[in-house]
Amino acid sequence: MTKQYIFDLGNVLARFDPYALTAACIKDEQIVQPVCDTVFDRPYWDLLDNGTLSDREFKMILRHRLPKEWQEMGCRVFDEWVQNMPPIAGMEQLVADLKASGVGLYLISNISIGFSETYHQIPWLNDLLSLFDGLVFSGPLQTVKPHAEIFEYLLHTYQLDPKECLFIDDSPLNINGAAAVGIPGYLFDGDAKKLRTFLKKT
Protein backbone atom coordinates (compact mmCIF):
# COMPACT_ATOMS: atom_id res chain seq x y z
CA MET A 1 0.00 0.00 0.00
CA THR A 2 1.26 3.44 -0.92
CA LYS A 3 1.80 5.64 2.12
CA GLN A 4 4.15 8.29 0.74
CA TYR A 5 3.68 10.36 -2.41
CA ILE A 6 6.66 12.10 -3.99
CA PHE A 7 5.91 14.86 -6.49
CA ASP A 8 7.92 16.74 -9.07
CA LEU A 9 7.23 20.49 -9.35
CA GLY A 10 7.60 21.69 -12.93
CA ASN A 11 4.79 20.48 -15.19
CA VAL A 12 3.35 18.40 -12.36
CA LEU A 13 2.32 20.97 -9.77
CA ALA A 14 3.15 24.16 -11.69
CA ARG A 15 3.10 24.83 -15.42
CA PHE A 16 6.63 25.47 -16.68
CA ASP A 17 6.20 26.83 -20.22
CA PRO A 18 9.23 28.95 -21.22
CA TYR A 19 7.44 30.71 -24.08
CA ALA A 20 4.46 31.67 -21.91
CA LEU A 21 6.76 32.80 -19.10
CA THR A 22 8.63 35.02 -21.57
CA ALA A 23 5.47 36.38 -23.19
CA ALA A 24 4.18 37.37 -19.74
CA CYS A 25 6.96 39.97 -19.62
CA ILE A 26 7.43 40.92 -23.28
CA LYS A 27 4.62 42.20 -25.48
CA ASP A 28 6.54 42.38 -28.77
CA GLU A 29 5.79 38.97 -30.28
CA GLN A 30 8.74 39.23 -32.67
CA ILE A 31 11.29 39.06 -29.89
CA VAL A 32 9.55 36.70 -27.47
CA GLN A 33 11.04 33.56 -29.05
CA PRO A 34 14.67 34.72 -29.31
CA VAL A 35 14.63 36.06 -25.75
CA CYS A 36 12.95 32.85 -24.57
CA ASP A 37 15.58 30.71 -26.30
CA THR A 38 18.35 32.65 -24.54
CA VAL A 39 16.82 32.92 -21.08
CA PHE A 40 15.72 29.27 -20.93
CA ASP A 41 18.73 27.80 -22.72
CA ARG A 42 18.89 24.30 -21.22
CA PRO A 43 22.68 23.97 -20.65
CA TYR A 44 22.65 27.06 -18.43
CA TRP A 45 19.53 25.91 -16.57
CA ASP A 46 21.24 22.60 -15.94
CA LEU A 47 23.98 24.54 -14.14
CA LEU A 48 21.36 26.37 -12.09
CA ASP A 49 19.67 23.08 -11.24
CA ASN A 50 22.87 21.42 -10.05
CA GLY A 51 23.85 24.41 -7.97
CA THR A 52 27.06 25.29 -9.82
CA LEU A 53 25.69 28.58 -11.18
CA SER A 54 24.02 31.23 -9.02
CA ASP A 55 21.13 33.42 -10.14
CA ARG A 56 23.46 36.44 -10.07
CA GLU A 57 26.03 34.67 -12.24
CA PHE A 58 23.30 33.51 -14.62
CA LYS A 59 22.11 37.08 -15.14
CA MET A 60 25.66 38.28 -15.82
CA ILE A 61 25.99 35.61 -18.51
CA LEU A 62 22.52 36.44 -19.82
CA ARG A 63 23.45 40.09 -20.32
CA HIS A 64 26.49 39.05 -22.36
CA ARG A 65 24.38 36.76 -24.53
CA LEU A 66 21.57 39.21 -25.33
CA PRO A 67 21.66 42.33 -27.50
CA LYS A 68 21.91 45.45 -25.35
CA GLU A 69 18.34 46.51 -26.08
CA TRP A 70 17.00 43.14 -24.86
CA GLN A 71 19.10 42.74 -21.72
CA GLU A 72 16.69 44.31 -19.22
CA MET A 73 13.77 42.40 -20.70
CA GLY A 74 15.68 39.13 -20.46
CA CYS A 75 16.62 39.77 -16.84
CA ARG A 76 13.01 40.62 -16.04
CA VAL A 77 11.84 37.32 -17.55
CA PHE A 78 14.34 35.49 -15.35
CA ASP A 79 13.49 37.49 -12.23
CA GLU A 80 9.76 36.92 -12.64
CA TRP A 81 9.47 33.40 -14.04
CA VAL A 82 8.56 31.84 -10.70
CA GLN A 83 5.76 34.29 -9.96
CA ASN A 84 4.42 33.87 -13.49
CA MET A 85 4.12 30.07 -13.27
CA PRO A 86 0.47 29.04 -12.87
CA PRO A 87 -0.65 25.94 -10.97
CA ILE A 88 -1.70 22.96 -13.04
CA ALA A 89 -5.47 22.61 -12.92
CA GLY A 90 -6.66 20.22 -10.26
CA MET A 91 -3.31 19.58 -8.64
CA GLU A 92 -3.65 21.96 -5.69
CA GLN A 93 -6.89 20.26 -4.65
CA LEU A 94 -5.43 16.81 -5.21
CA VAL A 95 -2.48 17.58 -2.93
CA ALA A 96 -4.80 19.06 -0.31
CA ASP A 97 -7.00 15.96 -0.42
CA LEU A 98 -4.00 13.67 -0.06
CA LYS A 99 -2.80 15.71 2.91
CA ALA A 100 -6.22 15.42 4.54
CA SER A 101 -6.12 11.64 4.08
CA GLY A 102 -3.02 11.43 6.25
CA VAL A 103 -0.47 10.14 3.74
CA GLY A 104 3.06 11.52 3.52
CA LEU A 105 3.81 14.19 0.90
CA TYR A 106 7.27 14.91 -0.45
CA LEU A 107 8.75 16.84 -3.36
CA ILE A 108 11.90 16.41 -5.43
CA SER A 109 12.60 19.17 -7.94
CA ASN A 110 15.51 19.97 -10.20
CA ILE A 111 15.62 23.66 -9.44
CA SER A 112 18.01 26.45 -8.52
CA ILE A 113 19.30 27.60 -5.16
CA GLY A 114 17.61 30.92 -5.89
CA PHE A 115 14.22 29.24 -6.16
CA SER A 116 14.71 27.33 -2.93
CA GLU A 117 15.35 30.63 -1.13
CA THR A 118 12.50 32.66 -2.63
CA TYR A 119 9.55 30.43 -3.58
CA HIS A 120 7.77 31.28 -0.32
CA GLN A 121 7.26 34.80 -1.64
CA ILE A 122 4.70 33.45 -4.14
CA PRO A 123 1.48 33.00 -2.11
CA TRP A 124 -0.12 30.10 -3.98
CA LEU A 125 3.17 28.23 -4.24
CA ASN A 126 4.04 28.77 -0.60
CA ASP A 127 0.58 27.60 0.47
CA LEU A 128 0.88 24.47 -1.67
CA LEU A 129 4.40 23.51 -0.64
CA SER A 130 3.61 24.13 3.02
CA LEU A 131 1.42 21.00 2.83
CA PHE A 132 4.47 18.83 2.15
CA ASP A 133 6.33 16.88 4.80
CA GLY A 134 9.64 17.31 3.00
CA LEU A 135 11.06 19.35 0.13
CA VAL A 136 14.19 18.35 -1.76
CA PHE A 137 15.63 20.92 -4.17
CA SER A 138 18.54 19.91 -6.38
CA GLY A 139 20.46 23.20 -6.35
CA PRO A 140 21.42 23.26 -2.66
CA LEU A 141 22.36 19.54 -2.82
CA GLN A 142 24.29 19.84 -6.09
CA THR A 143 22.76 16.62 -7.38
CA VAL A 144 19.86 16.28 -9.79
CA LYS A 145 17.29 13.80 -11.00
CA PRO A 146 17.58 11.19 -12.43
CA HIS A 147 20.73 10.43 -10.39
CA ALA A 148 20.24 7.96 -7.56
CA GLU A 149 21.82 10.29 -4.99
CA ILE A 150 18.90 12.70 -4.85
CA PHE A 151 16.35 9.90 -4.38
CA GLU A 152 18.54 8.24 -1.76
CA TYR A 153 18.86 11.57 0.04
CA LEU A 154 15.08 11.83 0.29
CA LEU A 155 14.67 8.24 1.47
CA HIS A 156 17.42 8.56 4.07
CA THR A 157 16.49 12.03 5.33
CA TYR A 158 12.84 11.18 5.89
CA GLN A 159 13.29 7.48 6.67
CA LEU A 160 11.04 6.30 3.86
CA ASP A 161 10.58 2.76 2.58
CA PRO A 162 10.80 2.97 -1.24
CA LYS A 163 8.23 0.20 -1.61
CA GLU A 164 5.67 2.38 0.20
CA CYS A 165 6.30 5.38 -2.08
CA LEU A 166 4.98 6.55 -5.42
CA PHE A 167 6.97 9.08 -7.46
CA ILE A 168 4.99 11.36 -9.79
CA ASP A 169 7.00 13.09 -12.51
CA ASP A 170 6.55 14.13 -16.14
CA SER A 171 9.95 12.79 -17.28
CA PRO A 172 10.50 9.13 -18.18
CA LEU A 173 14.19 9.54 -17.32
CA ASN A 174 13.31 10.66 -13.81
CA ILE A 175 10.77 7.87 -13.39
CA ASN A 176 13.50 5.40 -14.37
CA GLY A 177 15.92 7.05 -11.94
CA ALA A 178 13.49 6.55 -9.09
CA ALA A 179 12.83 2.96 -10.14
CA ALA A 180 16.56 2.26 -9.94
CA VAL A 181 16.42 2.84 -6.16
CA GLY A 182 13.19 0.88 -5.77
CA ILE A 183 10.62 3.69 -5.95
CA PRO A 184 7.68 2.95 -8.28
CA GLY A 185 6.59 5.80 -10.51
CA TYR A 186 3.70 7.41 -12.34
CA LEU A 187 4.40 9.33 -15.55
CA PHE A 188 2.25 12.45 -15.31
CA ASP A 189 0.72 13.77 -18.53
CA GLY A 190 -0.93 16.91 -17.18
CA ASP A 191 -4.26 15.29 -16.40
CA ALA A 192 -5.00 15.66 -12.68
CA LYS A 193 -8.28 13.75 -12.93
CA LYS A 194 -6.53 10.76 -14.46
CA LEU A 195 -3.90 10.86 -11.73
CA ARG A 196 -6.59 11.07 -9.04
CA THR A 197 -8.28 7.98 -10.50
CA PHE A 198 -4.97 6.12 -10.50
CA LEU A 199 -4.19 7.08 -6.90
CA LYS A 200 -7.52 5.70 -5.70
CA LYS A 201 -6.26 2.29 -6.76
CA THR A 202 -2.94 2.51 -4.89
Image: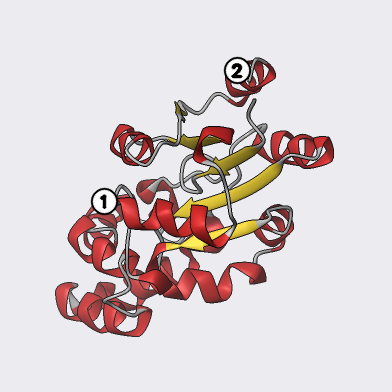
Residue at mark 2 = 198
* Residue 131, horizontal then vertical, whole percent: 73, 53
User: Going from the N terminus, do you reach mark 1 or mark 2 first?
Assistant: 1
Estimate the x, y position of residue 77 in percent, counting from the top left.
Answer: 40, 66
- Residue in the image at 73% along x and 39% along y: 103
Compared to residue 77, the image places residue 158 above or below, namely: above
Horizontal and vertical percent position of residue 4:
63, 40
Task: Report whether 49 appears left or right of 80.
Answer: left
Q: Depth check: 72 or 158 in front?
A: 158
Query: Can you say which quadrant of the picture contains the N terminus?
Result: top right
How many numbered dots are placed on residues in this image?
Answer: 2
Label 2 secondary element? helix
Within the image, what quadrant is residue 172 found in?
A: top left
Residue type at tag 2: Phe
Q: What residue is at 43 percent from the left and 47 percent from the top?
A: 20
**Quarter of image, res 109:** bottom left
Task: Determine which of the numbered discs, if any, sits on residue 90 in the image.
Answer: none
User: Which residue is under mark 1?
Assistant: 33
Of 12 and 4, nearer the camera is 4
Check the image and name the residue furthest to the right: 100
Q: Nearer the viewer, residue 117 or 25?
A: 117
Q: Which residue is more in the foreground, 99 or 17? A: 99
Q: Nearer the viewer, mark 1 or mark 2?
A: 2
The color scheme shown is secondary structure
Mark 1: amino acid: Gln
Up-down: is 1 above or below 5? above
123 lies left or right of 49: right
